Image (cartoon, rainbow, N blue to C red):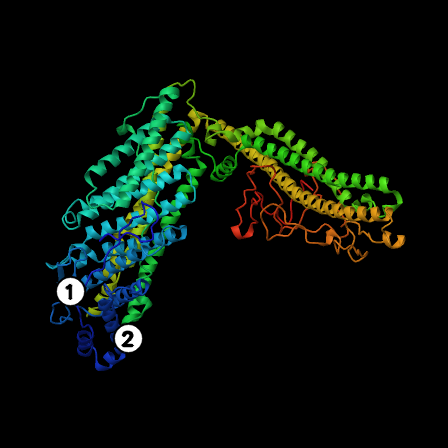
Amino acid sequence: MAAPSSSSTTTVNIMLAIYEKKTVQLDLYRPLRNYIVFNYSDRDAQNVEDDLQTLKQMRTDLERGIGVAGDSLSSRRDILQGYYRALCAVESRFPISPDKDHVNAINFTWYDAFKSKQKASQQNIHLEKASVLFNLGAVQSQTALTYDRSSIEGRRQASHAFIAAAGAFAFLRDNESSKASIGSSTTVDISLECAGMLERLMLAQAQECVFENTIAKGSTPGVCAKISRQVGIYYEEALGALNVAPLNQHFDKTWISHIQLKAALFYAEACYRYGLELHEKEEIAEEIARLKSGISTLSESKKSSTKGAAQQLLEAITKLETNLNRNLERAMKENERVYLMRVPAASSLSPLPAISLVKPLPMHEVLDPSKDKMFASLIPENSTKILSRYSQMVDDVIRTQAEKLQQGSELTRVKLKEMDLPDSILALEGHSSVPIALKEDVEAVQISGGPAGLESELQQFRDLRRVNQELLVQTEELLQKEAAEDAQFRSQFGTRWTRPQSSTLTKNLQDRLNRFAGNLKQAAESDTRIERSVREHLPLMSILNNHPIESALPTLSKPMMSLDANEDAIVGALKQSLRQLEGLGTQRAGLEDMLKEMKRKDDILPKLMSSNGSHEDLFRKEIAKYDPICNEIAQNIETQDQLLRQIQAQNDQFAAMFNLEDYKASREKSYKKIEAAIAKYREIKENINEGLKFYVTLQEAITNVKQQCSDFAMTRNIQCREMIDEVQRQIGGFSFQDKNNSSNNYNYTPVGQSPHQTARPSSYYQQHPEQQQPPQPSSGYGHHHPPTYGGPPQPQPPYQYPPAGGHPYTQQQQPAASHEYGQPAYPGWRGNYYNAPTPPPAAQQPGSLPSPYPTPPPHQGGYYR
């Protein structure tokens, strides 16, 4: 029955699917039509002729589709779901049994899915319904293996399919297994035990897909360990069912080997991941114990469960065993040399934490027969109205009792909040709590690096400022070098050197460089203020370095002096009362679920249609089924009221004994200090982020201007050589051109002017370099074009600081948001806030490196301008 995925690319991703049960041909049309004619009329039979034909076709499709190669699994799923809904409609209107007054000409026959020679034959529609549900779960499990589980999306889809399969098997166990097992002719595959085992197996494989996606997304070792442990728990539950009757002799040994190895593998995987988290916390002794436990489990499973196991699974176990041993050796060496901790015994370790991220898909809505309305005309109109009246009675009972339960829970919540329970008890035990919203804010600060991480970001400021300054100096040197060469030849050749001076052509570029220099100067001053703010407020923000943040809260302790030394007795009595109150709350939740479940299963239609007495008598008898739960609800509410009064008296003693009011005041003060630290940290963090965006944006602008200057210098160099040749020919007497014509050969357009204002007849360049497409920046983003700086200078915003208390920077210049940046801040630097995804290879030029910075937002804040 094992079916490994053909698309799996890892050694772990070997999973199981279920084959469908097989059946024999069966005619439902003739027996049901005869029953309608005999018990209703020919006209009624004619009215439901389409429903009868539909039912017949569904059964034919069901028989033909089982085991057919290439059959669409999605269409197969739809056939099974539709046929099950039709069977529910048949059950409510046609009594099928050996009774002579019932439909007794239908005999359902189905073969066992795991022992194909075993079969069951019953005149019991629940055998048919149970078999259809089993096949629905089997089809969903086969669908899961069709997805490409080497990708995140494929594993997500496979997980959903396994969840749907688990839902089908859970629905089979809860609704049909017991009814289908009545009589001597039964099969094990649809039993309660087998359905429950298959549900656990499907959940295990769904959680396994989630675990693989968690690893692929780079989640923390602690989270991975919890998810992995739950995978192992699901496999262990399935294995436990396989090892006892009636399943222990029913399944192939390879099934048991596979599931046992998977259970061991994911327990050891959880030990490995949990060990990584322990190593980060320097809890070396427990790490050693966990690693040893995982290695021991793998070793034992390999000794007893390798027969028939997939080679990929054995390779995965071997690989994990190697990793465990490597980490164990490292931890033991560190413990021997540094920590010298005593390694606890495996039996003393607490269970590994687990978290389930999957649950069976609810099937009630999918399999609701009311959607199809089959055989609806067979119910008399007055019977429909009567049934509706009963449903209204049930709804009234459910609504009234649900309101009582909700009011009871709300009263408990309000009373406990007024008494500051159970927070004050937890504080006494050293487990102070922080409001959820505040705790989430603190965790967000800590995840982003916390106050201790601000220094590294300040260093990024310094590095980026240095890079911008170096770029600025390099750009200015390009212009100075070109101007010096021009001046040298102008001095050498005198009036014959007729081309415009460099300073005339580069005025716009030089002005822009001067503005950039002013930007950097203002930014440096703002950086200084930020650094000063960090130093001044670091003592305030240091409270956020507490892990966990609850350790920064004040503690509630016993009074130093006591007259009768009965503090422990008071606390113990209060704890006991709180436990009783919690038990009442759990009971209320269970009672509400019981009411809803009772209503869901409350189908009196067969009784109503077969009843010959008073409908009112039937309703009173049926509605009385809810009385026991209603009485329990009333008793629960009364007990809670008494217990709350008792807790109030006990809490008054507790508050007086432990001076609770002073503790609350101190705790509130700590909350406010934490809130102030978070606010200041966010303010500084926002300023830092804005500064980093400013420097990256400025770096791009300087890089683009540097490229313009380089192009300008190169063009001037070429023209210089041409003009030198021309002047030398004039001096040597080889020029036959008019002097005026000679001097007009070089007409320059100053950098920044429109190219249409002056024409250049130079034979080497037909237009000013500024008009040509500038070379692409070295960022590797070849499809982006840097902004052109050759047009008329645009008006710039004023460079002034905002009023005191506001942001000290105003933005100088910002390129369009659609451009990537020219080059990294410095080789190898990747900031915490600018790790943009690498563009696809097609967008990069050969030999270039992707920029580490993202495109700046269209509107930056006002800190850096």
Residue hosting label 2 = 377
Left or right, residue 769 beside residue 196: right
Secondary-structure class at tag 2: helix
Image position, residue 226 (x, y; %): 35, 39
Q: Earlier in the sequence, mark 2 or mark 1?
A: 1
Whether residue 402 is visible to the viewer of this picture, yes or no, is yes
- Left or right of 635 in this view: 612: left
Q: Mark 2 belongs to which amino acid?
A: Ser
- Relative to 774, is 117 above or below? below
Q: The C terminus is located in which quarter?
A: top right
Work out whether residue 325 or residue 39 is closer to the camera in this orientation and state it: 325
Q: Nearer the viewer, residue 181 or 6?
A: 6
Task: List x then y, in percent, for residue 77.
Answer: 30, 63
- 460 relative to 7 in the view: left or right: right
Question: Whole-percent x and y of residue 183?
Answer: 12, 59
517 with respect to 3 (left or right): right
Identify the element where label 1 is drawn.
Answer: strand
> Which residue is at a point 26% across and 39% down the rendered structure image?
264
Would you call the spot at circle 2 few (<14 residues within 10 Å), some (14-19), or many (20 or more)? Answer: few
**Residue at the spot x=38%, y=30% of the render?**
278
Q: Residue furthest bottom?
A: 43
| Label 1 environment density (alpha carbons within 10 Å; few <14, some 14–19, many ≥20) | many
Specify the label residue 109 is tagged with.
1
Label 2 and label 1: CA atoms lie apart by 29 Å
Residue 514, by quadrant, is: top right
- Residue type at numbered disc 1: Thr
Spot occupied by residue 735 in the image (x, y as percentages of width and height)? 85, 52
Q: Quadrant of residue 293?
A: top left
Above-or-below relation of 564 to 725: above
